[in-house]
Image (cartoon, grey):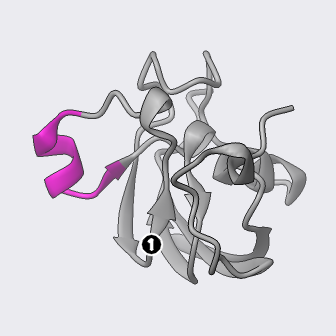
Amino acid sequence: YFGPEQEADYPETAAPACKVTVCMDGRSQTVTAPCGVSLLRTLEASGIAAPSHCRSGDCGWCRSKLISGQIYVPKRMDIRSEAERRYGCIHPCCSFPLSDLVIEIPPVAK
């Protein structure tokens, strides 16, 4: 299990948990997210079906949009382009909340 607090650049001021409002298919749901757990794991533990494949940020399958709030992404796992960062694209599999968030995730293909 990977914990972001092991990373040298992880902020010491991170709260223990944050509220994450998840928007998907025109609906929204708010869940509590431990800051040391990836957004994808939090979504899954909350019963929210989110797309995923590699679980390491490499494939981009879980690409979602950060509407508001702050996340931490370990530098070694952050493969987003500058354009993706600028437009709020995140990979929940390797993103950790640092504040209350609003994210938009794509529906899982059925």
* Residue 56: % across, % down: 59, 23
Residue designated by label 1:
70
Q: Quadrant of the C terminus?
A: top right
Horizontally, residue 51 falls left or right of residue 2, namely left
Q: Is residue 63 above or below residue 105?
A: above
* Residue 13: % across, % down: 62, 81
Of residues 41 and 73, the one drawn nearer to the viewer in this rendering: 73
The quarter of the displayed image where residue 60 is located: top left
Q: Is residue 107 above or below residue 17?
A: above
What amino acid is found at the position of numbered circle 1 in the picture? Gln
In reply to whether residue 88 is colored magenta, the answer given is: yes
Residue at (41, 38) in percent of width and height: 63
Of residues 28 and 79, the one drawn nearer to the viewer in this rendering: 79
Q: Is residue 6 visible?
A: yes
The stretch of residues the image draws in magenta is: 81-89
Residue at (51, 34) in percent of width and height: 62
* Residue 27: % across, % down: 56, 72
Residue at (87, 32) in percent of width and height: 1
